[in-house]
Image (tube, rainbow, N blue to C red):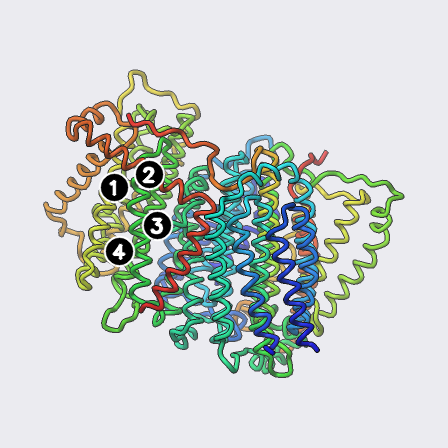
Amino acid sequence: MSEALNAGLALFVLALAAWMVVARDTFAAVVGFVAYGLLLTLVWVQLHGVDVALTEGAIGGGLTGAMLVAAAARLRRTEAAARAERPGWPTRAAAALLAGGVTAALAVAVLALPVPAPSLAPETAANMGATGVGNPITGVLLAFRAVDTLLETTVVLLALIGVWSLAPDRVWGGRPGPRHRADPNETLAYLARVLPPIGLVVGVYIFWVGADLPGGKFQGASIIAAMWLLAVMAGLSDAPPISRGWLRLALVGGPLVFIAIGAAGVATAGAFLAYPDGLAKLLIKAIEWALLPSLALTLALILAGVPERPAR
Amino acid sequence: MAAVMAPFVGALAAFALGGRNAQRVAMLTILAGLGIVAAAAHSGGGLVYLLGGWAPPLGIALRADGLALAMMLAVAVVVLGIGVYACAGFKTPPGEREARAPFVFWILLLAIWGSLNLVFVSGDLFTLYVALELLTFAAVPLVALDGSAETLRSALRYMLYALAGSVFYLLGTMLTYGVYGTLDITLLGARVAANPVTVTAVALMTVGLLAKTALFPLHLWLPPAHAGAPPAASAVLSGLVIKGSWFLVIRVWFDVFPGVVTMPSAQLLAGLGAAAIIVANVVALRQERLKLLVAYSTVAQIGYLFLMFPLAFDAGAAEIGRGGALTGGLLQAISHATAKAAMFMAAGLAYGALGHDRIAALAGVARALPLTVLTFALAGVALMGLPPSGAYVAKKLFFDAAGSSGQWWWELVLDTGGLLTASYVVLVLAHALVRTDAPIAPRKPVPRIAELAALALAIASLALGFVADGALGLDALWGKLTLSDLWSAVLVLAGGAAIAAAFARDLPQIFGGAGRFAFGRPLRAAAVAVGGAFAGADGILRRWPVASLALLAAAFAFGAALLAG
Amino acid sequence: MMDTATLFGLCAAALVGLGLYAFIVNPQPLRKIIAFNVIGSGVFVLVGAVAYRGGAAGWGGDPVPQALLITGLVVAFCASALAIALLQRLAREAESVTLASDAPAAPPATPE
């Protein structure tokens, strides 16, 4: 039964991917992408990766999808010119041949993966006790491979700086994105009033359980960011000017706390990002609490986009 | 660890404080970081640092070996040079609390530096992936710093092509995990064996990294991106950023899969390098704009960085190994980092003074900006590989390795490359040295400190030869340079001048007359036609569909060459 | 019938190929960004399959690759965000946003 379900799921995923490739209209392809993200969430569940499924739903499908929808709407006018540049059949044939070749090579590789599969699961399990947390993913992300997570928060911040760097000079320090005004009686405004409190609770809950159950800061932060964005879109709230001191501090606060706790590890536990015995869970929680607001704010501002209006 | 984290902490602090403080924080961080790196280099290599106290395969280790320390030191010096240079160009204008370009530049400079240090010391393939992405995300905004449509397009092309490269690298990394259950470089080096999945992984990782390094023919994004950025940013991009993914190729080939890579694959890698040297140098010679010429020179110099792979191959053990060739490659990279940064800085100063960078209209620059032209000349000498530059010592090491392994053809490539490099350096200097009737008045005052910073880097590139000569105990320079070395240097310059007279598009008058005299019209016309054909081929290769097909084709070529061993 | 890991592993291989094809031939940059996400999702599903194969110690999957996936997804999001921002800014500055070549028109080659 589950085999048939999986096969159907895989076929559906492939069909949607093919749709995104061939669809004439970019907007149609984007809509396909959002549905694709939802399907992938199911794939992750089937592959026993609930944490990954949450991330995919929140960030992969959710936030990326939202960005693509907005961009596709804005880029409508460039469609016709782009279509005229479609390469001729020799290029397409060569592309199909080579891309097909990559698929074939990967398929061979998948079939040739060794049995039994190597795994770090036993080793993770043996060392989870030292971290004090119950969710192995959290253990990997904040203890064994904490540096990856630290770098990842830097990546997110760099992406934001990259987006800001595209602002025209005269509005530097101004507010991102257009000012939205919505009819207060519209559905959007209604949703924007009702959903954020619920979303906030859900986001914090997902974050809160992350230590022991599937969930965590990135997933929680993206839900919170999405809620704030909804409020902005409905005109209930406005994006802050990017020159605000409190904003800058809030953005770097999480990573700086992370680094500070990591550096304290040098003195107290003998290595950068090491936690002293018994304090591991507490410190991991502290890092996550510090990262949550910074991440939510960074993601929200990335979505809000390039500064377009003076701060006034 | 401190060397990696210091730039990141600096970047965060610069971001939080903003405004004029961004520059102050950046300069302080650069000085502190240089000190940390120098101290680490002084205490010697071989350091292993377990992050969080967790040992691989579960944890992540940082390893500061000799290669990493040498690169970190070199990068710190170049960052300092660029930082001093940029103090004038990226200053927050008086009366403004914060300006966009300086704010972004100083933060990204630190971020690039931190990412590079991480690339050099990280012992984990996935952490390296994140570091590579950090590097790309920090580099792309630098390309489009001026916000014009042209640079935005170059930045987007760079971004998307680099993303394809990182996806390939990640794919190879994860296949490797699927087979060996670890991402640690040392553990992998002991476990790997040649089998289909491993070969696929190596091919994918290599090609992905080559796309990010812009090795010919995967260079579509580099010339416009590096030529369009502000000069200080070009120096960062050309001198430093591409060295990150290049260094990873070394890690992958020498440390992760030494027993898997084969001689044919190494020959293929160096073959692409040779093609880069020939094609990009000729195309450089035909550029009308100085910054594009320098950018194409980078494409060619990237080629040099890959010549060492077959030379490092130990035929007896049928394995790639560390030795003279690898040291030579490293020297070449450091030499290029310093010289190319200096060259872009000099080109930027000339641009600032003239308001344009058309090579044919450089007359009078030597009189107006003697230091800048001297910088360009010295950096050019370093790029040509003339003594006493670091590239000269590197060339010696390559020649030794080529001689002992009977691969004479790479010597030929090196010599041809030197001649071609000499040709465009001579061409630019010939234009710049033309006297004008009236001295040209700079449109903007040229900051002396910036001129000196560029000159210092050019001199560093030359002095590198002495440093390396002493450190490696080669004893090839002091008192060893003979008359014949001098002769060959003169020959390179003369040959370069002859090539310039044959191929270049615009020639200064005396030069053009000499060219016609030496070659006659038909030969000159033929040379121009050949040059045009090279430029045409380059134009086709740099079209998006062609370049991305080349990316996939290269992956298959490497797969085949790896299986052929 | 094949097991779950192999099934999704092969599905991943096909996704990478589909994405690569679109990445090469579709001239609209936004479609290239979507294609990048399809290639990326192919890589991630492959990692998911690798993690699934490594399930042990009472867990359905190897937590290390699963954790890497979360990092990878966030990095891919950032990449898309930066690329989309660049594209939108380009669309505001220029008529055409396509990327086939860098210069609208190369100056003609004129010897001497």
Upstream in the sequence, badge 3 or badge 2?
A: 2
The x and y percentages for residue B220 are 43, 45
Q: Is residue B33 left or right of residue B535?
A: right
Q: Considering depth in this image, is A7 or C62 the residue closer to the camera? A: A7
Q: Considering depth in this image, is B311 or B481 the residue closer to the camera? A: B311
Q: CA distance from mark 3 to mark 2?
A: 14 Å
Q: Give the chain of mark 3.
A: B
Dot 1 and dot 4 within a common chain: yes
Whether residue B457 can be seen here: no
Asked which secondary structure carries label 1, the reply is: helix
Spot the residue most to the left: B483
Q: Residues within 10 Å of mark 4 (few under 14, many from 20)?
A: many
Upstream in the sequence, badge 1 or badge 3?
A: 3
Upstream in the sequence, badge 4 or badge 3?
A: 3
The residue where tag 4 is placed is B468
The residue where tag 2 is placed is B284
The residue where tag 1 is placed is B420
Asked which secondary structure carries label 2, the reply is: helix
Identify which amino acid the numbered label 2 is placed on: Ala
Any mark on residue B302, and which?
A: 3
Q: CA distance from mark 1 to mark 2?
A: 9 Å
Q: Is residue A130 above or below residue B449?
A: below
Q: Give the chain of mark 2.
A: B
Indicate the quadrant where residue B253 lies.
Answer: bottom left
The x and y percentages for residue A89 are 49, 47
